[in-house]
Image (tube, rainbow, N blue to C red):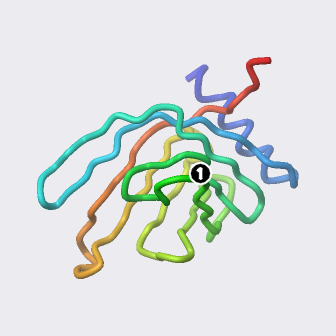
Amino acid sequence: MKKLLPIALTLLAFNASAKELALVCDGKVSLFPEKIIDLELSGRVFSITDKLVVLKNSIPGLSVESGETVFTITKMNDATIAFVFSPNIRVTGGINRFTGEITMASKSDTNENQLTRIFKGSCRQSSRLF
């Protein structure tokens, strides 16, 4: 519980300020339905403003291959930040503001009820090393 308190306080306090918040997330991306492949990912860097979530590096199948991927925030309240990739609304995500848990998913182009990619992980506030 001690680990969750700093991220919860940071994400809650963020609502009141207009500055940028940086998070580092580690987790696993699952690729399917053809066959399930799980890839462990670490160091995914997200920058959050009052309107955008920017992924600074990539998550296979859920972001552009190189460079930054910009998501539009669709909902921000005390508990959640939800976002969507504007060029492809089939890619969505959310961050739990209390636990720092993140989930991102991509729906199939042919079957809206079928997911093709899921990223689940946990985030912590990024801090400069020097």
Q: Is residue 18 above or below residue 10?
A: below
Which residue is found at the position 55% from the left and 38% from the top? Answer: 99
Residue 87 left/right relative to 112: right
> Mark 1 packing: few (<14 Cα in 10 Å), some, or many (20+)?
many
Q: Position of residue 44 (x, y in %)?
A: 53, 39
In the rendered view, would you say 10 is above or below 94? above
For the C terminus, the quadrant is top right
Question: Which residue: 61% across, 47% down?
Answer: 56
Whether 47 is drawn above or below 6: the answer is below
Q: Quadrant of residue 84?
A: bottom right
Q: Is residue 68 placed above or below 27 in the rendered structure?
A: below
Q: Is residue 66 left or right of residue 124?
A: left
Residue nearest the observer in this picture, 49 or 12: 49
Question: Quadrant where the N terminus lies?
Answer: top right
According to the picture, the residue beneath numbered tag 1 turns out to be: 55
Who's the residue at 34% across and 45% down the image? 29
